[in-house]
């Protein structure tokens, strides 16, 4: 099973980092359902800016935590140097 770590950009320009084993389904939740994260629910719509596939859930969560530790400027620099996957 594949797992993903991802970064979203919210309608207010803020970033949200997450992890999942079904990226398409999770993006749908973030944008359309009550079961999406509260943070993104009040900042819709959200746009996928970056995702990466990793081998297991522990790695996905670790990468998510790494994204969350970054400053806004670090995220912007990272996103400008990578293409959305």
Image (spheres, rainbow, N blue to C red):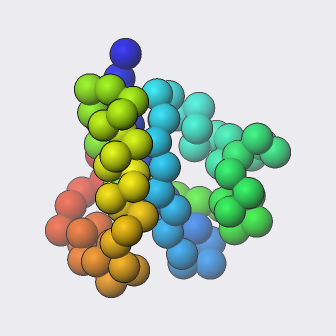
Q: Residue 4 versus residue 84: which sits nearer the camera? A: 4
**Residue 62 image position (x, y, % from top left):** 34, 46
**Residue 51 image position (x, y, % from top left):** 35, 47
Identify whether 56 is placed above or below 36: above
- Asked which quadrant contains residue 50, the reply is bottom left
Horizontally, residue 42 falls left or right of residue 39, namely right
Q: Residue at the right extreme? A: 34
Horizontally, residue 23 falls left or right of residue 46, namely left
Q: What is the quadrant of the C terminus in the image?
A: top left
Query: Which residue is at 54% across, 75% downward?
Result: 14
Q: What is the quadrant of the N terminus in the image?
A: top left
Residue 5 in view, yes or no: no
**Residue 75 image position (x, y, % from top left):** 33, 72
All told, the count of numbered labels is: 0
Q: Residue at the left extreme? A: 81
**Residue 72 image position (x, y, % from top left):** 39, 80
Residue 1 in view, yes or no: yes
Query: Which residue is at 64% across, 40% downward?
Result: 28
Q: Residue 71 versus residue 30: which sits nearer the camera? A: 71
Horizontally, residue 15 falls left or right of residue 29, namely left
Query: Which residue is at 37% across, 68% downward?
Result: 69
Q: Residue at the bottom extreme? A: 73
Q: Residue 40 versus residue 48: which sits nearer the camera? A: 40
Query: Which residue is at 32% across, 26% downward?
Result: 56
């Amino acid at each position: 099973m594949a797992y993903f770590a991802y970064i979203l950009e919210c309608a207010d320009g803020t970033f949200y980092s997450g992890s999942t084993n079904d990226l398409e389904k999770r993006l749908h939740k973030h944008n359309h359902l009550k079961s999406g994260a509260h943070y993104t629910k009040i900042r819709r719509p959200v746009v996928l800016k970056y995702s990466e596939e990793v081998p297991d859930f522990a790695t996905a969560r670790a990468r998510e935590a790494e994204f969350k530790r970054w400053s806004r400027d670090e995220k912007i620099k990272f996103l400008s140097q990578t293409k959305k996957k």
